[in-house]
Image (spheres, helix red, strand yellow):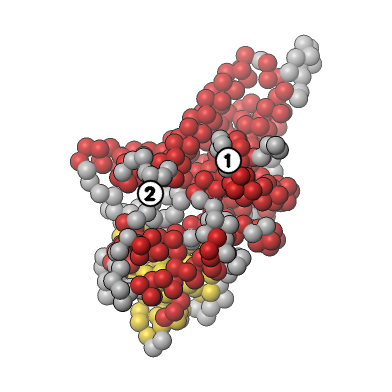
Amino acid sequence: MAQLTADRLLDGLSDAERGRAERVESVLPALRKAAAGADAEGRFPIEHVGLLRDAGLLGLVVPEEYGGLGGTLRDLAAATFAMGTACGSTALAYFFHNTSASRGLLPLEAIRAGLFETDEIPAVRAFAEKVLTRMAEGVWLANFASESVKSAGANISISTTATKTDGGWLLNGEKSFGCATGVADYYLTTARLAGTDTAAGLATFFVPRDAAGVGERPTWDALGMRATANQGITLKDVFIADDEALTVPGAFVRMLQVSRGSFVGNQCAISAVYLGSAQAAYDAALAATTGKAFADTGRPVASSPMHQVLFGDMTERLETAYLWIRRQLELETSEPPLRSKDDVFRQWRMAKGSITEACFDVAVGALKCTGTSGTANTGVIARAVRDTAMSLVMTFPAERGRLEAANLVTSGAENALFANVAKGE
């Protein structure tokens, strides 16, 4: 049986999982070939949209009944890990496309759990199924929740406003740091209904990329993942029809109740992107130092005491990241659940920081192993250092996650993941 990149992350792939992983493996050569140029230009390789669509991967985590491949979080983490070894930017953008599936899967789960009233179900079901069928058909969705506005009590604060008008809604606001700006077919956008100030007023809208009033923020000169088209969008009186929105009061909160972890969507798989990048850096450093010999002794550079220490440290840090991510995957995919939702959430708050810090340590160790020759910006290792540095702050840094975990343990305080921020009303 051929070894797949996914096998490095997951043991015991089922036949179905292996089939899906083979689709991912088929696109890796093209992703790897384009990675250096995309990074240098700071441009998402638009040809990757067709590449992933043709491989059927835009519907990876969509149930088969809606035309998708029927993958789970395990499949998504395996995919983003594998893509991360080839092109971190494409892996990250692909991850955020797949998080859109939560806006389809969770409403349907909440319906099954009896959380919606009979008269609410048709609208909720129609929106959820639209999300899933569009993904399965090869539509790229950019998931826009993040904003520049900050709140002391929440990780993500929403001030983008939706105001009712004839036949639909007018959206106004700004969304920051959303992958696939100018690339995705639709921006799946979270906004608050005008006049509301709690999470019960949060709603979701399909915003066409070329809709009137949609603009792009200035190109972001990022430290890492430079080819993700991550600048974000502006919205000025953007009209969205009623049937392109989920505005049932309290839908957002009820959907959150049935999630296994974070509502943002399969967050474990974002760390797999960085683990893939770290693994690529490790492999590059190993190849460079075992393939080059000292002129006087003829022994590989990797045999020096300094390199032995570095590889020992890198190996330990790499395995630490694998252990954390595998445990989180187990907690979020096991049936029946192994732990309560609160325990799974608390574990994730710790796991994210531990995984990303370990990945960054691996990338820095690889840089030390290869010296100045490893600092060329087009190289795998230099890109990994920059890319994994971004992971230290994305969503939240390790310190915040550990603080929240400690707070949950010591006081049982609930984490407010989203806040509804009123501006100028």
Relative to 297, residue 249 above or below: below
How many numbered markers are drawn?
2
Q: Residue at x 57, y 18 (%)?
A: 309
Discs 1, 2 touching: Cβ within 8 Å? no
Relative to 241, residue 83 above or below: above
Q: Closer to the observer: label 1 or label 2? A: 1
Q: Indicate the position of residue 81 as horizontal and vertical percent values.
A: 58, 43
Q: In terms of depth relative to the viewer, which is nearer, 19 or 251?
A: 19
On residue 158, which mark appears?
A: none
Q: How many residues crowd around disc 1 within 10 Å: few (fewer than 14), some, or many (20 or more)?
A: some
Q: Residue at x 53, y 43 (%)?
A: 272
Q: Is residue 2 left or right of residue 75?
A: right
Quadrant in which residue 382 is drawn: top right
Q: Is residue 357 left or right of residue 219?
A: left
Q: Indicate the position of residue 226 as horizontal and vertical percent values.
A: 60, 52
- Can the viewer see residue 150 in this picture? no
- Which residue position is annotated with label 2? 261
Q: In terms of depth relative to the viewer, which is nearer, 387 or 198?
A: 198
- Which residue position is annotated with label 1? 13
Q: In terms of depth relative to the viewer, which is nearer, 409 or 384?
A: 409
| SS for dot 1 | loop
